[in-house]
């Protein structure tokens, strides 16, 4: 993944942040993280949906894994696994222990009542595509 692609994703995220807060009363780390990660992984097939959590049974925070860079992306930008884990522990005060693929996402979404905010996801994709990605 090229730097300009990451820049376009970040621009799209910035554009829709207020939409997420205003229309859905949540931010990227209290529900919107999954919407952001899902929009990115659906738009860029060379990325993977991961979660950073207290345990493999929990889903605390959805992120995008970029294998070509061996880096992770969330609303705070690109980070190494160590940086991401430290941020979750030190800033978000969540004692995370795993960073693993979110392979069972369909079952998880149904069982936990997680939803994708479709208008936010659609706007993210439109903003990314507006950068000719």
Image (cartoon, rainbow, N blue to C red):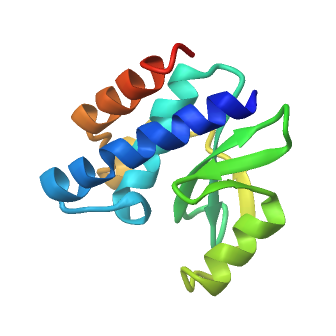
Q: How many marks?
A: 0
Please determine whether, in this image, residue 62 is positioned above or below residue 11.
below
Q: Is residue 48 visible?
A: yes
Image coordinates for residue 99, horizontal then vertical, percent? 73, 58
Image coordinates for residue 54, horizontal then vertical, percent? 63, 73
Please determine whether, in this image, residue 108 is positioned above or below residue 40.
below
Tell me what residue is drawn at x 53 percent, y 36 percent.
Answer: 9
Q: Is residue 40 left or right of residue 24?
A: right
Q: Quadrant of residue 101?
A: top right
Image coordinates for residue 103, horizontal then vertical, percent? 63, 38
Tell me what residue is drawn at x 58 percent, y 81 percent.
Answer: 94
Q: Is residue 97 visible?
A: no
Q: Is residue 62 left or right of residue 120?
A: right
Question: Looking at the figure, which quarter contains the N terminus?
Answer: top right
Q: Is residue 126 left or right of residue 71?
A: left
Question: Looking at the figure, which quarter contains the C terminus?
Answer: top right
Q: Residue furthest left?
A: 23
Which one is in front, 111 or 31? 31
Image coordinates for residue 108, horizontal then vertical, percent? 45, 46
């Amino acid at each position: 993944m090229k730097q300009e692609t990451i820049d376009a994703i970040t621009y799209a995220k910035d554009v829709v942040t207020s939409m997420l807060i205003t229309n859905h009363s949540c931010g990227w780390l209290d529900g919107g993280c999954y919407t952001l990660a899902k929009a990115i992984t659906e738009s860029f097939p060379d990325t993977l949906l991961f979660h950073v959590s207290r345990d493999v049974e929990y889903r605390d925070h959805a992120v995008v894994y970029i294998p070509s860079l061996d880096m992770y992306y969330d609303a705070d930008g690109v980070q190494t696994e160590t940086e991401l884990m430290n941020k979750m522990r030190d800033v978000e005060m969540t004692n995370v222990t795993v960073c693993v693929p979110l392979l069972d996402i369909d079952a998880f979404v149904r069982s936990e009542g997680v939803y994708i905010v479709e208008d936010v996801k659609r706007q993210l994709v439109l903003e990314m595509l507006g950068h000719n990605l």
